[in-house]
Image (cartoon, rainbow, N blue to C red):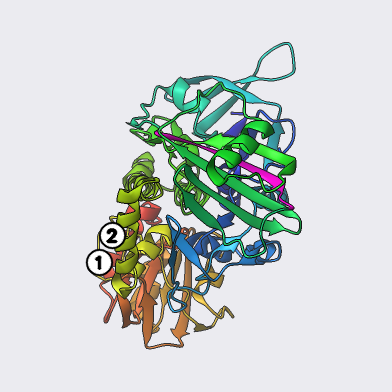
Amino acid sequence: MDTDVVIAGAGPTGLMLACELRLAGVDVTVVEPLAERSGESRAGGMHSRTLEVLDQRGVLDRFLAEGELQPVGHFSGLYLDFDESESRHPYPLMILQSAIERLLEEWAAELGVRVRRSSGVSGVRQDEAGVTVELSTAEETPATLRARYLVGCDGGRSTVRKLTGIDFPGTEATMTALVGDVELPDLPEDYVWVRRTPNGDYSAIAFEAGWHRVITSEFDQVADRDEPVTFERLRESMVRVAGTDFGMRNPRWVSRFNDAARQAAQYRKGRVLLAGDAAHIHFPAGGQGLNMGVQDAVNLGWKLASVVRGRAPESLLDSYHAERHPVAERVLNNTRAQSALVRPGPQTDALREVFSSLMVFDDVNQYLRHLLTALDIRYPVDGDHQLVGRRVPDADLTSYDGADCVYELLHAGRPVLLDLHGSADIAAVAKGWGDRIDLVEARSEDDHWPVPALGEIPAPTALLIRPDGHVAWASAGTPDTSALRTALATWFGPALQG
């Protein structure tokens, strides 16, 4: 084998997955058709759960230093309130995708990830032992890589998905949106983010001094995918929608998107897996796409690493589809709703008025907030405790290992068995998995922990935390060691012999 895992695509999803695999000791090669990072701004922020994921790996400060926390969010342009009790990082971080990719690539380099640029996937052949990946390069002779697994993180038009024959069903586009980073010298000083007009809607967001991200949306017309995207088309669209171009000039980047929503029928086919936009595309309302891709990577990374290193059966990979496919399905559904809510016309105006009046109720605001932040996700994990399947709260700790909070325990990307009451039985069970989990005895600073969608719940006496920060087992009293053994074996393979 040339490498354990080939990742197609050096975007945020592919780079995050590469980092997760390297943390677990897996040899990984990222192949990317672009000769260098494009520098295009693209996505513009990260939500709470993604910030938590980066905090779990100890790299969040790098991203906070280059972005700006935004104390407000929105659902289809209708403002949402955030609850500071639900997370240490309740607010969205405004940071351009170009910066996110640069920071992730720097981290990947520190971990020893190989990024092979000017190399696009052109062929895929898999067998019982591995995958042969054919690459199109600048060389006359096509190159190949042999790996145990291939993961397609190569975007909505994924070559890996197409070559593997994975269906991509969904709904067709009904509108066209143009986006660009430009100067807008004539934009009024009192302009507030987004405006709807009878001809569509437009928005302008200042990411840095002198520059704005502008987006125009026009409905019931869909551009041909091969139609060129130019600055002039963006300017003309702004004039049609807003009645002026606000002096638009000096474009850095222009692109186009629509509200087509599709999802891969299966996230795994043999030794080939999909993540990020290769697995799901949707209208980018609420900025959920990049976030979902990063969270795909964190869910898949430790599972794939466990299988590659022979610590867990290959069937563990099936849980990736089982857990992440419903999450994307929910996102596709809420972005379809948001697309419908921005259409021009008196019927939509009335619907938005009713919808807005409902959002003053805490339960409605919370429900919509959780759709965007993904803090309430609960995976289908066996267990009776309320925390099982949910992301673990970042509770304050007094730890014998020196960690001040739960997320500090996850920096190495390893499973953590956290004993909050000093149980000899838990320590005895942990020995069977001592080569692959970290046993930590600590005390919680709080009697109750905040859990999104549940409120305050009594602090557990012990819990088993997966590397992705989700709870695989928890105890509210005397620990059920039989259930603990089952959870350890299910997620981390059989116990050591003897």
Residue behind mark 1: 482
In magenta, the rendered stretch is: 174-185
For this orientation, the residue located farthest to the front is 243
Image quadrant where residue 36 sits: top right
Left or right, residue 232 beside residue 359:
right
In this orientation, does residue 89 appear?
A: yes
381 or 192, which is in the foreground?
192
Q: Which mark is residue 486?
A: 2
Q: In the image, what residue type sits under mark 1?
A: Ser
Q: Which residue appears at 72% of the width and 42% of the height?
A: 39
Spot occupied by residue 302 in the image (x, y as percentages of width and height): 48, 51
Name the outermost residue toward the top. 140
Element on which disc 2 rests: helix
211 shown above or below 59: above
State the image coordinates of residue 390 (x, y, percent, origin top left): 35, 64
Relative to 41, 290 lies left or right: left
Q: CA distance from mark 2 to mark 1?
A: 6 Å
- Mark 2 is on which residue type? Thr
Nearer to the camera, 414 or 430: 414
Q: Secondary structure at mark 1?
A: helix
Do the numbered discs 2 and 1 sit on residues whose CB atoms are within 8 Å? yes
Q: Residue 398 lies in magenta, yes or no?
A: no
* Camera-side residue of 239 and 313: 239
